[in-house]
Amino acid sequence: MTTAGLEDLWRPGAPRVLAGLVRGYGDFDAAEDALQEALLAAARQWPDDGVPADPTAWLLTVASRRLIDRRRQDAARARRERAEILRTPPDRLVVPAPDVPGTADDEVTLFLLCCHPVLRPPAQVALTLRALAGLSTAQIARAFLVPEVTMAQRISRAKARLRQAGATLTVLPARELPDRVAAVAHVLYLIFTEGHASSAGRDLYDVSLTREAIRLARYLHARLPDVGEVTGLLALMLLTDARRAPRIAADRSLVPQAEHDRSTWDAAAIREGIALVESALPRGTVGPYQLQAAIAAVHAEAPRAELTDWAQIDALYRMLERAAPAPVVTLNHAVAVSMLHGPDAGLRMLEPLLATELRRYHRVHAVRAHLLELRGDAERARAAYAAAAELTTSLPEQRYLNERAARLSFPE
């Protein structure tokens, strides 16, 4: 059994196991350590002994035993130290196991614990990515564009802060949920983004992550059906994931969206996503996720790339820049502008981004390369493709960008 196969088995149940451990034992840090030990045990035993009938129950049992053993050892050590001081033999230690079975709301409740108000938003997001999505510290660090050691310290401090605040795993009433929805939605967005476009490695995407993000977004939407941004987030995920199939060719090469066989797009997911967008937009204030979903819907509705309604996309990006200005929004807007008004207009929008931290983001150079190529400036386009290839840590993207650079160096 491969590592990926094992992850597919444990990933759906791991958050519920962690939530049950935190609820039953009250120590987030120790619970996560015990879960990791149980996952290592599964990686050693399942390939030889076979997968248990209920993998989640197996993980919960093994992790609980680890926690109980550790508590017994700690308590026995303390008793021995006290006995030595008092010169009396320690009594037999009995540590009853708390009741830790999972509940239907455990995963969302664990989300809300990770997004506790005592934590700052970056810590909320990082802790939730670690606890709910099972992302490694290195993956989370790449998502935040910070060193791995910095992210490890951030996660450790977040867990300590929850412990100091006495935060516990309790189900909040629905009226209190909106206060934490923004952080939870951002977490789900990051999980989906990491799955849709893996930040490193040989695979372009990780379906297990996108599937998990969509599942959790559906659950959140079921709890908060009238929150427009939750609806918009789910729609954005569905409309984006619907176009996944043709992104990789048979030879594992990356295929740009303009060259997709659109008959392979998931029509059912597109219909569902568009329906969600249409239900959310008329409700009142339009947020960033709803606007991004609307942009994705325009792309998804075009039967061919040349029939894309770029004027509508341009208008939506202008609204998005007012609602949530960010360099990445400007970068994406530049593509729409170039399709409407030519590559020079898009290049003018990109120039200021090269003076910001975004200059270390490979996609800025990739978009610039594409626009320079459309403009006919092969030499500068080749250099920009090469720069983008050097910056990306995704092997499929790196191969694609190097191929584009080589094609301009040695035109057919």
Image: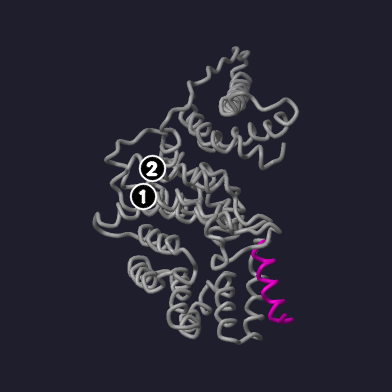
As displayed, is residue 19 above or below residue 310?
Answer: above
Instruction: Give the structural element (helix, strand or loop) at label 2.
Output: helix
Q: Which mark is residue 230?
A: 1
Is there a contact, CB below 8 Å, between mark 2 and mark 1? yes
Amino acid type at circle 1 is Val
Is-magenta flag for residue 103?
no
Helix, strand or loop for the magenta stretch, by majority: helix
Rendered location of residue 373, percent (x, y): 60, 81
Rendered location of residue 333, percent (x, y): 43, 73
Point 37% across, 65% down: residue: 324
Q: Which residues are magenta?
A: 396-412
What colouring style does the render use?
Answer: one colour
Q: Which mark is residue 168?
A: none
Point 49% across, 68% down: residue: 305
Q: Quadrant of the C terminus?
A: bottom right
Q: Residues within 10 Å of mark 2 (few under 14, many from 20)?
A: many
The residue that mark 2 highlights is 220
Is 73 or 20 nearer to us in this picture? 20
Is-magenta flag for residue 405?
yes
Is 186 or 217 nearer to us in this picture? 217
- Is residue 385 rendered to the left or right of residue 189? right
Instruction: Give the structural element (helix, strand or loop) at label 1.
Output: helix
